[in-house]
Image: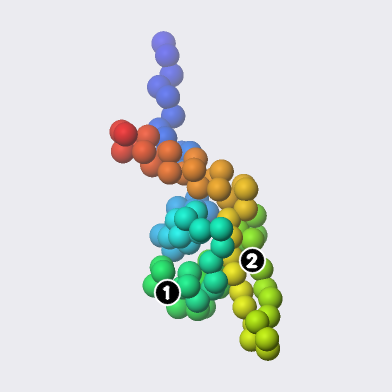
Amino acid sequence: MTTPAEHPRHQLNEVVHSPVRFSIMAALSKAESLDFKDLRDAIQVSDSVLSKQLSILEKAEFVKIKKSFAGKMPRTSASLTGTGRDVWAAHLQTLRDIAGG
């Protein structure tokens, strides 16, 4: 007797699957990097929500945070790491597998 294949949902990345983190990953996948304010506005969350979710993604090594200064003004930008891009691609493929496409 053959064991049925594991359902694709088991392949979803729990870190990425959160709606806000999913939105961050989606936005960053389309750009080399995004400024904090641009990312915040693109996914329509507060500064504190974005900061917390970026920290989770950075800890997972999916996102790199870069802090710099433009004159005296601090600037924060985020970008996907190579691992983050790979995880994002795999997550999207799993969603397609679940949806049957």
Image location (x, y in percent) of residue 95: 38, 42
Q: What is the residue that sits farthest to the front in this orientation?
A: 71
Compare residues 7 and 41 and report the one nearer the observer: 41
Q: Please report whichever mark, 2 or 1, sits nearer to the chain's N-terminal start.
A: 1
SS under mark 2 = strand
- Asked if residue 30 is positioned above or below residue 96 in the image, the reply reads below
Rendered location of residue 57, percent (x, y): 58, 59
Q: Nearer the viewer, residue 5 or 71?
A: 71
How many numbered dots are placed on residues in this image? 2
As drawn, is 17 to the left or to the right of 69? left
- The residue that appears at 48% across and 72% down in the rendered structure is 38
For the question of whether residue 21 can be seen, the reply is no
Q: List the single residue furthest toward the left.
A: 100
Q: Amino acid at mark 2?
A: Ile
Residue type, mark 1 in image: Asp
CA separation in Å, label 2 and label 1: 17 Å
Query: Observer-nearest residue: 4 or 63?
Result: 63
Q: Position of residue 37 (x, y in %)?
A: 50, 76
Task: Name the residue beneath numbered marker 1.
Answer: 41
97 left or right of 25 in image: left
Task: Name the residue rendered at 43%, 43% in the picture.
Answer: 92
Looking at the figure, which quarter contains the N terminus?
top left
Q: Is residue 79 above or below residue 12?
A: below
The residue at 37%/34% (across/down) is: 97
Using the rendered view, name the quadrant where residue 42 is placed: bottom left
| SS at circle 1 | helix
Check disc 2 and report the residue beneath it: 65
